[in-house]
Image (cartoon, coloured by chain):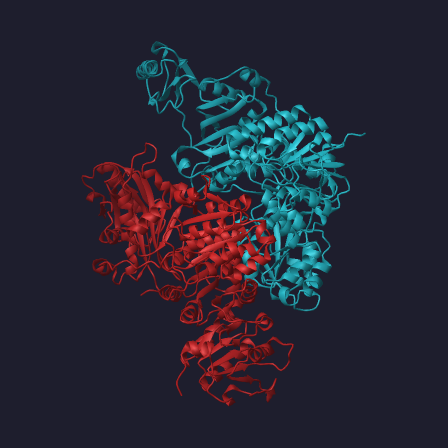
Chain colours: A red, B cyan
Amino acid sequence: MAELTLGEALFNPRAIALIGASADPNKNTSRAQRVLHKAGYTGRILPINPGRTEIFGDTAYPDIRQAPGPIDHALIMVPAAAVLPAIKGCIDQGVRVATIYSAGFAEMGEAGRAMQDCVVAVARAGGMRLIGPNCLGLVNVTDGVPITNNAAVEAETLRPGPLGLVSQSGSMMGALLSRAGARGLSFAKIVSVGNECDLGVGELAELIVEDDATKVLLLFLETFRDAPALARAARRAHVLGKPVIAYKLGRSDLGRQIAVSHTGAMVGGDELANAFFHEHGILRVDTLDGLVELPRMVMGRTPPRARRVAVLTGTGGGAAMVVDRLGSLGIEVVPPTPAIREAYSLPDSPLIDLPMGGAPGEYARLFRDLVASDHCDAVVGVLGSTSRLRPAQVNENILSVYDGSKPIAVFCAPQADEALRISDEAGVAAFRSPETCADAIHAYLTWRVPRVAPPAVDVTTAAAQVAGAEVFDEVQACALFATLGIEVAQAQVVTAPDQVRGIAGPCAVKLLSPDILHKTDAGLVRLHVEGDAAIAAAVTALLAMAAQKFPAARIRGVLVAAMQKGLSEVILGFRRDPEIGPVVMLGMGGVLAELRDSHALRIAPVELDTAWEMIGAVPELRMLQGFRSLPRGDVTALAHAIVNLSNLALLPTVQEAEINPLIIRAEGCGAVAVDGLVAFGDDHP
Amino acid sequence: MAELTLGEALFNPRAIALIGASADPNKNTSRAQRVLHKAGYTGRILPINPGRTEIFGDTAYPDIRQAPGPIDHALIMVPAAAVLPAIKGCIDQGVRVATIYSAGFAEMGEAGRAMQDCVVAVARAGGMRLIGPNCLGLVNVTDGVPITNNAAVEAETLRPGPLGLVSQSGSMMGALLSRAGARGLSFAKIVSVGNECDLGVGELAELIVEDDATKVLLLFLETFRDAPALARAARRAHVLGKPVIAYKLGRSDLGRQIAVSHTGAMVGGDELANAFFHEHGILRVDTLDGLVELPRMVMGRTPPRARRVAVLTGTGGGAAMVVDRLGSLGIEVVPPTPAIREAYSLPDSPLIDLPMGGAPGEYARLFRDLVASDHCDAVVGVLGSTSRLRPAQVNENILSVYDGSKPIAVFCAPQADEALRISDEAGVAAFRSPETCADAIHAYLTWRVPRVAPPAVDVTTAAAQVAGAEVFDEVQACALFATLGIEVAQAQVVTAPDQVRGIAGPCAVKLLSPDILHKTDAGLVRLHVEGDAAIAAAVTALLAMAAQKFPAARIRGVLVAAMQKGLSEVILGFRRDPEIGPVVMLGMGGVLAELRDSHALRIAPVELDTAWEMIGAVPELRMLQGFRSLPRGDVTALAHAIVNLSNLALLPTVQEAEINPLIIRAEGCGAVAVDGLVAFGDDHP
C-alpha cells in the first residue's frame, strides 16, 4: 500500500485512532468521536479504550496494537503519564502522526518538559511525527476531517472556505472560527499547535500553504519556536500567491511575560518579530478583528507598489477617525488627481466627500474611477447613515461596480449589520471599527515581497580568522571587523612600559585580556593620556592593577590607541537570535541612547538599501544629514559599516558582536570602530 | 407668562417653528416635522413656509411673525442667504433659541464666516441664542422632543436612557445612536453642534450635565472652541457624580488637518487635549466603540484610588490580548493576593486562569472575592468558548453574583452575541474586542478627579513689572523670571565699549534690542569671549553691525553675562493657548531635543507635585537623577522653576514666555535661567 505523505496523514488519514476515547458523553475525551461522525468522516474511526469493545457504535480496542491497520493518525487523550506508552503503541502499529491533546508537559515546568522531551525522543526514533502536546487538535474543513476535542468545533457548523489557520492558542481557534464565521468567512485547514514539541507553526504552515483549498494563511502567535521553517512557509506562500497574515502577542513586556509563562517558550522582542515578518513578506495586524477582516483585502493579491490610500466618504467624522489613525501609523492619504477633482467638482482636500444619495450614478462612477486610477494603491469607502438605513445602496454604489483590480475597504460608521453582511457576501472587506479598518489598510500598505537574500559575499579571510576561536580580545575583534571592511582605530599592544615610544596626541590606554569584562568599571581603562611618559606610567599601573585584582586572567598586554574624534557615536550590533536567527542592530551611542531607546534592527545580512532604511529609522542621526547648520557626517561610511558587520551572519560560529563606539567623522572622512567584541556560541560549532 | 430657562427652550420648548419646512416628503427639510409627530411631541408645531397654509396636517405660516406665540425654539432650514432674515423674524417673535440646520457658513471659508459672524451679531443684539449653523439639531429623548432633520433619528426607535451626547460631527450622532443601541444603551439628550457660532460644546455640556435623566455625558470632539465652558461642565459633572467621556480626533497631524478643514476651527495639539482632559477629570477613550462600551463601567462612579486591574480568564490567548495591550498602555495587571491564591490553589501568575466549567460555584465565588478585594481597582473577566456556547453561564458565574461595588469588564474572545446581550441587559460593560476592552480599562484607571487649582500666589510685584508693557527685552524678561523666584544669570548691560571693566571668565556678549529676533542667526551673539579687551571689541562690533543691519531697531545696549556651566539644559515654556488657556511646558534643550520631541505639558499654574510629574515624563532627565555613575543635577530647583514660571498664568497680559536655556547645575547648586523672552498679547489687554 502506498505510504501517505505527512500532509495526507495529518489532514486525510485513512483511519484515526482515538486513544483514550470515552464512552461518557459528558467527558471532553468523548467529543472527538462525535465530531468525526457529525462531519461524516469516511475513514475508519478506532476508539482505543481498555474497558470497552464498542463506543458510540464504533468497535473499540483495548490497545492500538490490536486495532486493524493501516492507521495514519492517532489522537492521544490519555493522562500525561500514559502518553509515552501510547506513543510506543502507535509506533508498533506504524502510525505516521499523533496529535497529543493531553496536557501536563512543558507548559507545567521542568518535570513536564523532561517528560515531553522523552516522548519526542521515542517518537523520533520510531519515525513518527507529533502535534502538541497540550493542543486542541486540527480540522480539515475542506474534506470534513476534524481531529479535535474542541467544543467550538463541535458546536459550529463548519463550511469549507479559503482560510488556513495555525494557532499557538488553543482557545483562540474557536474564537477565530466564530469571528470569521460572523463575517461569512470560513476555513480550509485549522491547527492548534500546543507546545510544538515536534511539528511547529513553521512546518505546519509549510504543509498548509501547499493545500489547494487554502488561499490565505492566518497565524495567531504567542512566540517563535521554529522561525526558519516559518520563513520558508512564508516565502513559499508568496510564490504561490497566498498572503500570510499574523497576529502576534508580546507588544508589551507584560504581554510577553504572560505569553511565555502560558506556553513555556522563549521570550522574543516585538521588534524582532516585526523585522522577521517584514523580511519574509508576512502581513502583520495589530487588532484581533484585523485578522478576520483583512483577508478579503489581500486574497489573491501581491504587495502594493506604494503606500497611498484614497478615502471616499459620506461622513466627515467617520472618515476622520480612520484617517487620524492612519496618520499616526504613518500612512499617507492621497488626494484625488486633478482630473478626478475636476470631473466631479471636488474641493481641494485629501478626503473625497461625497454622499451616496447625490446625483444618480455619480458615487458609483467616482468609486470606479478611483479604483482604476494609478494615483492610489487602495481605496476606502467610509459609509454614513446610508449603510444602516439603505444598505442596498452599498451594493448599487460600490459592490456591483467593483472590478477587484485594487483592494478596497468599506468602513461603516453606524451599526450597519446588513451593509456589512452584503459586503461580506460580495467578498469585499468590510470593517466594524475605524481602528480595525486603519489597522488592515496599514498592514496591506506596508506589506512587502519577501526580501531577496543579498548575493553571497566572500568571507574566506574572515572565516579563517575565526576558525576554531572560542574567545576574542578587543584586538582580535577589531581585526575581524577590519577584514570585513570596517575601518578600525590604529592601536598598538605593549607588554611593558619601555615599549611605549613616540605616540603623538591623546591616547586611550586599556588593559588587554579576554577574561576581564567591564574593564572601565574595573578601572582598567584610562582616557586622554598624552605623552610617552604618561602613557608608560599608565601601562605600568594597569598591568599592576590587573595582576593584583585578576590573578587568574590571561593578560595580553596593554592597548594604546590614539583617541578618535568625530561628530557622533553609534553602536553597531550583531546577534544570532536563538529563534529568529542573525540580526544586525544600529543604535545611538552615549548615555542619552540608554535613556531613550533609539535603534533599528533587521535580519542579517543586509544590503545598502536596508542599511539606509535603518539609518532613517534613528531620528538622532538626522543630525548628521544636514540638520540646521550642523556639519554633515559620513553617513555613507556608516551604511557600509552596517552592511559589512551584518556579513557576520555568514560566519556561523559568531554568536554576537558589537562595535561600541563606531565614531562617525565628517562627510567624506569615514567612520571608525574604536572598540568592540566578538563572542562565539556553544550552539553553533 | 414665566420665561423659560435656556435649557427648557432648547429641550422642552412649548412651541417649535420649522422655518423652511417642506411639504415634499422626499426633502430633508420635511423630516423634522415628521420626526416631531412620530415622537408624539405635545407642544405646538409651526411650519413656516411662504407658499403653504398647511403642511402634513399642521397649520403653516408664511412668516414666523404671523405664527402664534409664544415660540421658544426655531429650527432654521432655509438656504444660507435666507438665514439672517429668518433670525430677524425670530427676534421679532421673541424666540429664545434657534437651531440652524442650514450650511454654507464658516465651514465654507471666509465669505461664509463673515455671514456667520453677522448672524451671530444680530442674534446677540436680539437676545437670542443659536445652535449651529451646519448642524443636525438636537433631541430630548427623555421627553420625546426631537428638533432635527437627521435621517438616523427618524429611522431609529428612540428609547429614553441615561446617556448625554454632544457631537461636533453631525453624522456621528446617528452612528453613535445606532452603536449604543446595538449595546442596549440609549440616550437622554443629544446635540449636534455644527459650527458652534454661539452655543458650543462647553455651554451645551453645562446644560446637559444638569439634566436629571443624563447620568453619563459623551463627547465626540474634533477640536476645542470653548474650552473654559467645557472645563466648567466637566467640573460640575464631577460634583454631580456624572462621568464625562471624550473621543477626540486629532491624534495625528493629518487627522488634525482634516478635523480642521472639516469644521473651520483652529488646530489643537493632541497633547494639549490630553492635558485638558486630565486637568478637568474627563475620561478619554481612543477607540470609537470605547465611547459606547465604557459608560457602564463608570456610571455612578468616581475615579479609582489606584491603577490596578485583576484579570480572570478561561482563555490564555484571549486574556493575553487584553493584557498585552494594557501593558503597552502602562497599566499594571495585579496578581491575586496570597489569601485568594491559597483559597483557590492558583499558580503564581498575574493572570488568574479558571474556566467557568470547573467545580460548581467556584468561578462565581472567586469572581465575587476579586470584586470585594482591596488589592485591585477593577476586574476583567475574559471569556472563552463558554460565552458563545453556554451564555447562560455568564449570568450564573458573573452577572448574578456581581454587587456593583467595583467596575468590571467582560471581554468575550469568540463571537458571543448572546453573552454580550445578557451582559448589556444586566448593565455590565461587555466588550467586543480586546483593544476596546483595554482602551476602556485604561481610560477608567487613568481617570482622576478634576485638579484643584493651586492656592493663589502673590504676584503683585510681577504684575507691577508687566503693567502696561507691550514688549520686553531679554533683561526685562529675566527680571520678571527673577521676581517669580527663578534664579537668573547675572549680567550687565553696557552701551559703549569703555564701560567694560573687570569681568572675569568667559562671557556671552549679545546685542540687546526688543526689535530684533533671532539674534544668533543675525550674528549678534558672541559666546566664550574672555578678558576686558576682547569683550570691549565684541561690544563695538555688535553695536556697529546692529546699526548697519537694523537701522530702525531700538538698541538698548549690549548684554555681557558670564557663561554658565551645568549638567544639562532644558527649555521652560509658558503659553496662553487660544482655546485651552495657560499651559506650561518642559522640554530638553539642545539639538537632540529638536530631533526627538521630548517634552511634557500641563495646564498652568501647577504645583510641585505636577512639576515632578512633568520631570518624570521626560526620559532624558533621568540622567540627572542617579543614572549610572553620572552626577546628580538639581532637579528640585528645576521643579521649583516650573512652578514659578507657571505662575505667569496669573498675569493675564503675558501671552507667551520662554526660558531657553535653563541650566541645571549639580545637586544643591540650583538651576539658572540664562536667556528668555516674554511676549504680550493683543487679545489679553
| Residue A508 % position (x, y) | 28, 41
Q: Work out whether residue B233 can be spotted.
A: no
Q: Is residue A49 above or below residue B446?
A: below
Q: Quadrant of residue B81?
A: top right
Residue in front for this viewpoint, B498 or A133 = A133
| Residue B568 % position (x, y) | 43, 33
Residue in front for this viewpoint, A213 or A372 = A372
Tally the marks.
Answer: 0
Left/right of residue A99 with respect to residue B22 in the rendered view: left
Left/right of residue B150 with respect to residue A340 in the rendered view: right
Residue occupying the point 68% across, 69% down: B359
| Residue A389 % position (x, y) | 61, 53
| Residue B441 % position (x, y) | 60, 50
Residue occupying the point 39% across, 85% down: A2
Residue in front for this viewpoint, B218 or B564 = B218
Q: Residue furthest right?
A: B1
